[in-house]
Structure formats: structure tokens, C-alpha cells
DNA sequence: AGGGTGACTCATACGATGTACGAGTCATCG
DNA sequence: CGATGACTCGTACATCGTATGAGTCACCCT
């Protein structure tokens, strides 16, 4: 019985009449504490490292207690992911002159936030859009719109940037762990018929940040509404 | 004991002296049959639908028998993924005039191959590069290189395209299942502070293919070595 | 004062999963 | 005929997510 499952989330409510006396043990369980601890665990042990039992242990509680605050493990993932994506945007970009720099900054911050927690990249492609993602998309939209992108092109622009950032981040997030793997793979190339990528040392290229930035520039060149920005010096 | 784990894969060898007499039951277990059946299962039931026991059942064998042909479940995923990415390239593109059309065709085929098996998108970002992926990357490299992309820019170009295709495919693959989810999410936008993406109906936009193509065009505009291709009429 | 209510915790248990282990079958070759 | 090695598979184990329902305790109403 109990309240459980009222509306969308799971419980909550009740103002704050906590008796304040459990100084010795642990503070009371709460959604926020669960999410914070899940983050720790994920950072320390990766995606598979997060289990409800381990999480509960770290919180000093029984495994099943978590389910009062959270519907299921999926929700823990969703919350952890969204918490990674929190954006403390530029304090005042109300009327920035350089929309392009703003966009680049936003997207680089986005990517950096996720790379700080490598598990988050593999987690992102899930249907739940948390408020923080939506916030980022909103800000991006607003910026592009204000920069002069026609409404008809807005969605294409946003999805293109999204795709690019997502792909770059996911790829990067799943790659840097395997340094010798990459070397091994690259070696395998030599013995078979992949001459071009073998020669360009594609799998060994380490300048992820630079490549991200350059590719983003290309994309923005294409998307730029002001076309004389679109033609770089070449 | 047994051979198990010799070199890289697991066994193989032995020419073909099969006695040919099990016509009634099932053909003998084999790596290929395992992968093919795994594909069926994945297509039918999704990522979580694939379990070693179910796979074995479908093959008419015991669960543990699989492990003779395959190291572990991970390897089944890797093989299934690579099999999805098989590329029957354009028969003769030895000296195609229109490299750009070639690239677009390759990338659209890539995306389409994965979308035909929606589970594959979430699976791709793993460190193992199968031969088919490498083959696609090689072909892409060769095409770009032949089109005049400088060696120094090759890797950036490839990774940019990779990122874009990956992001687009993963996003799409995880989205089309949730049609009302998207409607619900879009509705949620209205009640909160996301005016721009609410107005552009970002989450309801259904023209994935068109958006993919347009964004790709933008990217290629940026990447094009021939810069007068880079400036569209716009 | 006493009983009820609802918020919260947790022990136990269930059904699944991946796979280690080792015994089994059988064709082949010495 | 005995050995070898390819291959199959029953059993068992640890671990997982979570359903169920009993337990604790603060609070409110009468």
C-alpha cells in the first residue's frame, strides 16, 4: 500500500519536520542523496558498478529502502544523467555579439560535462529528456534563433549539432579507456586491407579536442545563416 | 582443457568432414548459425531479449554449448553488430566523378543498415572495431582522399562524419519507439520554461531522413576541399 | 490517553541471468 | 583398441532487480 506511485514520480511531499537527532549514523535517505551517491559509484566503478545493493550499502541502508524514493534502477540512471548535464550557463549572454562563440562554448561545455563522467555518454541516448538537457536545448535554440536562423531551419540545425556532439562524446567516452586496444586495432590494420586508414593513423589520432573543435567549425560554417561567415579563408 | 582460446577467437579449424546425417534435427552448431539466430532474436525482442539461454533454445541446443563457439555474450554482441554493418558497396566506384554523392550514399546506407536493426545503434559505441566497420571507414577515407582532402585534414573529416552519423543514428534508433513519449515530453515543454523548442516543436519533428540529409550537406559544405562548393546559393 | 494513519525502512524470497566446472558423446587416428 | 580432441550439456553458483509484506515511528484526531 502506502502512497507509492502517485502521479508521475514517487512520493515526496512533507515539508521538513525532521527531528534532527541522527547525527551519529547517516542522514536520512533522500532522492538527492541517492543520486549523489549513484554518481560517486558510477564515477568510481562505471556503468556496471552501479547496483542497487551496492548503492544501498554506500548509503548505509537496506537495498529495498531505495525503492521508496525511486521507482526503479532506470530512474536512478535517468536522474544521474540529468544531474551530470546541469548547466551553469554564461552569467549574462543576454545580448552577446558573438553568437558563434556562444554556441561553441555551450557545446564544448556540454561535451566536457559528459566526459567528466565517461559513463554518461553511453547513457544519454535514452528517451527520457531530463530538465537539464531540455534547458541546454532551449538555450541553444534561442541563441541560434536570435542569430538569425530561420524557424524552418531551426530544427535541422539543432539536431545536426546534437548529432555531432552526441556522436563525438559517445565515441570519445568509449575510447580513451582502451589505449593499447587502439594500438592493437591499429596494428591489425597493417596486416589487412585497410591501407588508407592505416596510413592516416586514424585509430591513433589523439587530438580529440582539436578534432571536435574543427569539425564543429565546419558544421557551423554550413549552418551559419550569415553566409559570408560560411566561407573561411580556405 | 580442450583447445579453447587459442590465439584470438575460440577454436575453429577442422576442414569439413561432417558425416551428414543429422537431417532430422538441427544442423550443427556453428559460429555463423549462432550469429544469425542472435540477429533474429535481437530484431524480435531487442537488446534485453537476447539471453544465452533463449539463444540456445532457439538453436535447439543447451545453453553451455554456445560457449564452445563463442567466448562470451559480449562477443555475440560484437559479431551481431558487425554482421549488421556488412557493406555491399557500389559495384564500381573506381573513378566516380561525383565523390560527394558517393559519400552521401555511403553514409546513408550506413545509417539505414543500422536503423533496420534498431538495437545496433545503442550497441555500436564499443571499443571493438569489427572488419565491416573498418571496411566502411577505409572506403570513406579513400573516397575523401581521392576527392582531394589533404592528409592532414583526413582524420578530422572522417571523425566528423562518423560523429554525425553515429549521433544521428543512435538518437533516431532510440526515439521512434516512443511515439507518445515524445508527445508527452513535448507537452511537458508547454508547462515550463522552454518557449523556443516548444514553438519549433523540436520533439515532434518527424522528418528524420530529411534532417539527416540536410545536416550532412551542411557538414560536407564545410569539409569540402573545393571551397566554391562550400558556399551554397544561400 | 489511545488509536489510527501514513511515511519510511528492510529482511526475505523469487525468478532471471552469465558462465565456471566437469562429465558425457563420438569420430578419428595411432 | 586405446587415446585424442572436438563438441555438447546438466548442474551449480554468484549476482542481479525487485515483489511482498512486516516492522518502526512521528504525528494527528478524538
Image: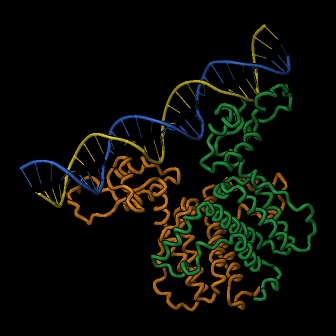
Chain colours: A orange, B green, C blue, D yellow
Q: Which percent across, then down, holds residue A109?
A: 54, 74
B213 relative position to A148: left or right: right
Q: Which percent across, then down, holds residue A132?
A: 48, 71
Q: Which percent across, then down, holds residue A150?
A: 65, 87
Snapshot quadrant of residue B23: top right
At x 70%, y 55%, the residue is B117
Q: Which percent across, then down, holds residue A98?
A: 58, 89
Residue B222 in the image: above or below residue B79 = below
Tell me, yes or no, if residue A179 can be seen here.
no
Foreground residue among A67 and A224: A67
Residue D27 in the image: above or below residue B225 = above
Q: How many marks?
A: 0
A120 relative position to C5: left or right: right
Foreground residue among A234 and A126: A126
Tell me, yes or no, if residue A19 can be seen here.
yes
Foreground residue among A84 and A24: A84
Q: Quadrant of the N terminus of chain B?
A: top right
At x 53%, y 54%, the residue is A47
At x 76%, y 73%, the residue is B153
Snapshot quadrant of residue B218: bottom right
A108 relative position to C3: left or right: right
A219 relative position to A118: left or right: right
Q: Quadrant of the C terminus of chain B?
A: bottom right
Amino acid at each position: 500500500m502506502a502512497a507509492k506511485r502517485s502521479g508521475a514520480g514517487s512520493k515526496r511531499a512533507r515539508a521538513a519536520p525532521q527531528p534532527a537527532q541522527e547525527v551519529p549514523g547517516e542522514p536520512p535517505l533522500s532522492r538527492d542523496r541517492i543520486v549523489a551517491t549513484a554518481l560517486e559509484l558510477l564515477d568510481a566503478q562505471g556503468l556496471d558498478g552501479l547496483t542497487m545493493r551496492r548503492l544501498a550499502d554506500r548509503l548505509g541502508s537496506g537495498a529495498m529502502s531505495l525503492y521508496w524514493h525511486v521507482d526503479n534502477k532506470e530512474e536512478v540512471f535517468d536522474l544521474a544523467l540529468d544531474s551530470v548535464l546541469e548547466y551553469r550557463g554564461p552569467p549574462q549572454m543576454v545580448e552577446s555579439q558573438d553568437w558563434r562563440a556562444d554556441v561553441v562554448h555551450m557545446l564544448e561545455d556540454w561535451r566536457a560535462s559528459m566526459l567528466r563522467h565517461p559513463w554518461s555518454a553511453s547513457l544519454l541516448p535514452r528517451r527520457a529528456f531530463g530538465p537539464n538537457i531540455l534547458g541546454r536545448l532551449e538555450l541553444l535554440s534561442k541563441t541560434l534563433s536570435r542569430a538569425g536562423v530561420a524557424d524552418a531551419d531551426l530544427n535541422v540545425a539543432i539536431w545536426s549539432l546534437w548529432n555531432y556532439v552526441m556522436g563525438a562524446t559517445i565515441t570519445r567516452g568509449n575510447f580513451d579507456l582502451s589505449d593499447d586496444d587502439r594500438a592493437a586495432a591499429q596494428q591489425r590494420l597493417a596486416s589487412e586491407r585497410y591501407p588508407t586508414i592505416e596510413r592516416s593513423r586514424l585509430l591513433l589520432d589523439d587530438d580529440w579536442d582539436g578534432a571536435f573543435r574543427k569539425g564543429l567549425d565546419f558544421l557551423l560554417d554550413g549552418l551559419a545563416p550569415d553566409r559570408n561567415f560560411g566561407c573561411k579563408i580556405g
